[in-house]
């Protein structure tokens, strides 16, 4: 990815950037740079504040976000936020099927724990009825209000500038208050237009929720809506990650994908993307995880008589009937437009 420097020389920072040591831990998405936390001090000037550098081990390039104080002669310091891009970021180390598969496995835990939390409350349909739980000055349900306001807050700290994130209210987001981050161009430009959150929301409330939450009303509307927000966000992240899956598969075998994309052969792409044996491994794994994480543990109860906070087979059904098919649909939508701007 070509980058633009704001003409701040490297000599502005003391020491040698190439000598910085990187943090060795795994990031949850292939576009995230590795973060170095180190103070930067402009040489010969007493007004520098601490900053952050982002460094990728493979490309040995740096993206630094510097906080510079501009000092007028005889005046007070005036903070100025700048984004300084000092090179490109090589995303190839993270954009591999093995790395993506590891990430999807970790997301299984997030989804299962979120659904277990939601299952402790009854269905509480009043939380989704604007007339039953109206918020003054807001046209919508309590869940709508909480989800929208959560997205507003997160947008201000640039959550939705990441290609990994997809809001449920994309048309009404405030601008970030923080300076922008420089993300490598991993996905094709058409990726930004793919957002199937309306389908995810419909699936959650019409199909999934009645099967994991007991019928009735316990009055815990706020807690219910908070749990719903976490579940919706986790499901959305997992399903939309299909864009990265599709890109990794495309890069691995472009000669197989390009003719199908040029012919707009949707069924051919579905056949190429489908691996029944691998999908069955996913179903078996999530059912086992749900049984392990969601069991009511008592010393006296034998394994065959244990009860669960959420039925493990429902988690497997969720993946088999919804998460895997929707993820695959995102892959197809992305691939059909992968060559749009070639």
Image: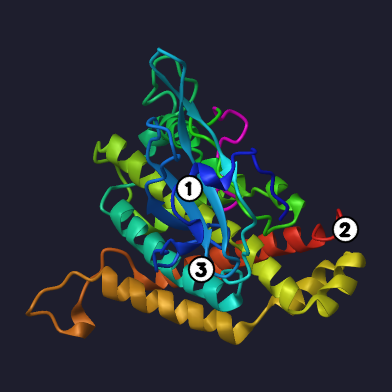
The magenta segment is 162-174
Secondary structure found at label 3: helix
Determine the image quadrant of residue 145: top left
Which residue is nearer to you in this view: 14 or 50? 14
Residue under label 3, please give it: 319
- In the image, residue 289 lies in the stretch drawn in magenta: no
Residue 211, compared with residue 254, is above or below; it is above
Residue furthest bottom in the image? 277
Residue furthest right in the image? 263
Q: Is residue 164 left or right of residue 50?
A: right
Residue furthest front in the image? 44
**Residue 134 in picture, x, y percent from top left:** 39, 22
Secondary structure found at label 1: helix
Which residue is nearer to you in this view: 247 or 128? 247
Residue 315, compared with residue 144, is above or below; it is below
**Residue 265 in picture, x, y percent from top left:** 86, 68
**Residue 204 in picture, x, y percent from top left:** 49, 51
Residue under label 2, please give it: 342
Which dot marks residue 205? 1
Mark 2 vs mark 1, CA separation in Å: 39 Å
Determine the image quadrant of residue 170: top right
Q: Tell me whether circle 3 and circle 1 mark residues in contact (CB < 8 Å).
A: no
Q: Is residue 81 left or right of residue 268?
A: left
- In the image, what residue occupies the spot 56% across and 30% down? 173
Discs 3/2, front: 2
- In the image, what residue occupies the spot 40% across and 73% down? 313
Q: Tell me whether circle 2 and circle 1 mark residues in contact (CB < 8 Å).
A: no
- In the image, what residue occupies the spot 39% across and 30% down? 47
* Residue 124 visible in the shown view: no
Mark 3 vs mark 1, CA separation in Å: 16 Å
- In the image, residue 170 lies in the stretch drawn in magenta: yes
């Amino acid at each position: 990815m070509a980058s633009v420097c704001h003409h701040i020389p490297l000599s502005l920072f003391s020491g040698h950037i190439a000598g910085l040591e990187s943090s060795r831990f795994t990031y949850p998405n292939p576009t995230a740079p590795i973060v170095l936390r180190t103070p930067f001090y402009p040489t010969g000037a007493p007004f520098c504040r601490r900053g952050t550098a982002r460094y990728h081990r493979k490309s040995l390039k740096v993206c630094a976000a510097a906080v510079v104080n501009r000092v007028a002669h005889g005046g007070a310091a005036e903070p100025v936020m700048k984004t300084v891009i000092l090179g490109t970021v090589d995303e190839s180390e993270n954009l591999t099927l093995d790395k993506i598969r590891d990430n999807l496995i970790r997301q299984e835990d997030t989804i299962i724990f979120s659904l277990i939390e939601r299952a402790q409350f009854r269905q509480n349909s009043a939380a989704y009825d604007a007339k039953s739980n109206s918020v003054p000055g807001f046209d919508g349900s309590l869940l709508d209000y909480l989800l929208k306001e959560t997205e507003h807050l997160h947008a201000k700290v640039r959550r939705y500038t990441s290609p990994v994130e997809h809001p449920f209210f994309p048309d009404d987001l405030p601008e970030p208050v923080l300076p922008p981050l420089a993300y490598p161009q991993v996905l094709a430009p058409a990726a930004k237009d793919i957002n199937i959150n309306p389908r995810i929301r419909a699936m959650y409330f019409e199909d999934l929720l009645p099967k994991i939450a007991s019928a009735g009303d316990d009055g815990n509307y706020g807690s219910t809506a908070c749990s719903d927000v976490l579940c919706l966000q986790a499901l959305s992240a997992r399903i939309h990650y299909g864009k990265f899956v599709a890109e990794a598969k495309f890069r691995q075998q472009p000669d197989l994908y390009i003719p199908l994309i040029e012919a707009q052969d949707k069924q051919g792409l579905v056949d190429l993307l489908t691996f029944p044996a691998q999908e069955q491994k996913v179903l078996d794994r999530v059912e086992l995880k749900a049984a392990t994480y969601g069991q009511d543990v008592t010393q006296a109860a034998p394994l065959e008589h244990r009860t669960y906070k959420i039925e493990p087979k429902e988690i497997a059904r969720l993946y088999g009937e919804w998460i895997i098919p929707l993820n695959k649909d995102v892959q197809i939508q992305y691939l059909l437009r992968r060559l749009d701007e070639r």
